[in-house]
Image: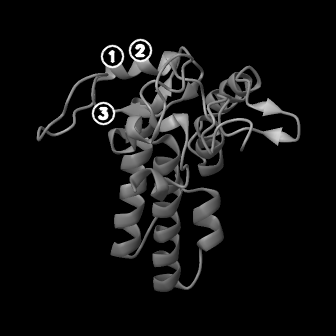
Amino acid sequence: ATVAETGWDFSSRWSRSGGEVGRNLSLNTSQATHVLPVDLNAVMYNFELTLAAISETVAAKSRLATILQEPRAASFHSSSAAAWAQAAARRRDAFDALFWRDGLGRWVDVWLQEPGQDAGRQPLRFNQQASALEQGRRTPTIADFATPLWAGLASPEQAARSIDAFKRSGLQGPGGVFTTAKTTGQQWDEPNA
């Protein structure tokens, strides 16, 4: 059910094997609950900024456009707006530390446990080294590029590097952009979407 709720049902994105040739890719290998998705966090950042703007607008009856256009320069007068703005700022500050991979020039989903590790009843833990190794093997998804740019999370340098990485990603094809560049037979993998 978790994979279906992501809107990416079903895709190599949620499989540790990433749809590699010769690896088993099925609904049984899906591990969506072990992934911190780039796009979800970018959408949540935008959502938090939007709630801050709405709260401020309700309180002050103005400033919506200003806050959304220049969120870092905005000052908030209502406590609700300030709380949402602080949540967005915390997410923005953590976003690059968790998702940006300088060597790849793009953001990547983060896996919460090492490959093959059985979490059992233990809480999932982020392993930066294991995650970075996995992400080097995983084919990029459109979410790695588009969502952080849309949400305004990219610095000018990151935007330029991400666009360059996108051009090399294999995601551009006849008729548009694929969600992934893996042909696996899954619903959201190339050539289906």
Coloring basis for residues: one colour
Q: Is residue 167 above or below residue 187?
A: above
Q: Assign a secondary structure to mark 2.
A: helix
Report if residue 47 is visible in the image.
yes
Q: Which residue is mark 2?
A: 133
Q: Estimate how packed mark 3 is, as few (under 14), some (14 to 19) or many (20 or more) residues with alpha carbons within 10 Å.
A: some
Q: Which residue is mark 1?
A: 129
The picture places residue 94, in percent across and down from the top left corner, at: 38, 39
Which residue is at a point 45% across and 62% down the rendered structure image? 48
Q: Are marks 1 and 3 in contact (CB under 8 Å)?
A: no
Q: Which residue is mark 3?
A: 112
Q: Is residue 98 above or below residue 1?
A: above
Amino acid type, callout 2? Leu
The picture places residue 161, in percent across and down from the top left corner, at: 67, 24
Amino acid type, callout 1? Gln
Compute the Cα span from label 3 to label 2.
13 Å
Amino acid type, callout 3? Leu
Q: Assign a secondary structure to mark 1.
A: helix
Instruction: Give the mark nearest the N terminus, 3 or 2.
Output: 3
Left/right placement of residue 178 relative to residue 55 reads right
Instruction: Give the mark nearest the N terminus, 1 or 3.
Output: 3
How many numbered marks does the figure carry? 3
Compute the Cα span from label 1 to label 3.
11 Å
The N terminus is located in which quarter?
bottom left
Left/right placement of residue 49 relative to residue 35 reads right
Compute the Cα span from label 2 to label 1.
6 Å
Q: Nearer the viewer, mark 1 or mark 3?
A: 3
Q: Assign a secondary structure to mark 3.
A: loop
The picture places residue 146, in percent across and down from the top left corner, at: 66, 42
Q: Are marks 2 and 1 in contact (CB under 8 Å)?
A: yes
Which residue is at a point 44% across and 42% down the rendered structure image? 27
Closer to the camera, 49 or 163?
Answer: 163
